[in-house]
Image (cartoon, helix red, strand yellow):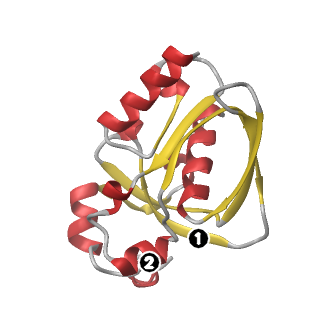
Amino acid sequence: MEALTSKMIATMRAAPGVGLAAPQIGIDLRVIVLEDRDELQKSLTAEEIRERDRVSFPTRIIFNPVLTPIGEERAMFFEGCLSVKGYVGLVDRSLEVEVTGLDAHAAPIKWRVRGWPARILQHEVDHLDGTLYIDRMKTRSFATGEHAKALYGGKSIAEIRRMLDL
C-alpha cells in the first residue's frame, strides 16, 4: 500500500492539487490523500484565506474514510478537480465534518475539521462514491478557471452569488 499512497501523493502534488482519491488514477480502493501546504495558498489574499477558512495541514492518508457532517452550517465556494481539469464551479458543502477511517499504518483515526480541509475531505470522499463536483455544483457557475478568475477575481463569495442570482 505504501507504493500506492506514494504514487497518489506524487500525482496530487504534480497536478498541483490538494487531494486525490484512488479511483482518479484507476485504482478501485477506498483511499484518499490530502494536504494543503502554505505554498499552495501564496496566490490568495489574506481576505480570501479567511473567507475560505483555509489552513495548512500536513499530508493525510485515509483508508476507508467515513464522513459525518457536523451541524447545519454550509459554505459555497469554487471547486476544481484533477478529473475535470481546467474548469471550476460553485459547490455548497457542509462547513464542518468528522472523518473516521484508517491511517497509513492501519491505525484508526478520527479527524474533525471545518472550512477548507472539510471541503477537501467531502470532495475526495465523493470520488470514492462515484460523484464529481460537477454533479453537485451550481450549474450557472460552471466556467473555465481563467474565465472565473477574470469574472470573479477579487470578489467575495457573497458578491459572486449576487452576480449569479444564487
The label on residue 157 is 2
Q: Give whichever of 109, 125 is nearer the camera.
A: 109
* Neighbours of disc 1 within 10 Å: few (<14), some (14-19), many (20+): some
Q: Give above or below for 109 relative to 166.
A: above
- x and y percent of residue 161 in the render? 45, 78
Quadrant in which the N terminus appears: top right
Secondary structure under badge 1?
strand
Residue visible at 48% across and 70% down? 52
* Neighbours of disc 2 within 10 Å: few (<14), some (14-19), many (20+): some
- x and y percent of residue 153 in the render? 27, 73
- Kindly indicate the quadrant of the structure image that contains residue 162: bottom left
Residue visible at 46% across and 23% down? 6
Residue visible at 37% across and 58% down? 38
The answer to the question of whether label 1 and label 2 lie on touching residues, with beta carbons closer than 8 A, is yes
1 or 2: tag closer to the N-terminus: 1
Residue linked to disc 1:
75
Question: Type of residue at label 1?
Answer: Ala
Q: Give above or below for 28 relative to 128.
A: above
- Kindly indicate the quadrant of the structure image that contains residue 29: top right
Secondary structure under badge 2?
helix
Question: Type of residue at label 2?
Answer: Ile
Q: Give whichever of 29, 88 is nearer the camera.
A: 29
- x and y percent of residue 74 in the render? 65, 70
Residue visible at 58% across and 34% down? 32
Q: Tally the marks.
A: 2
The alpha-carbon separation of the residues under discs 1 and 2 comes to 9 Å
- Kindly indicate the quadrant of the structure image that contains residue 128: top right
Q: Give above or below for 54 relative to 23.
A: below
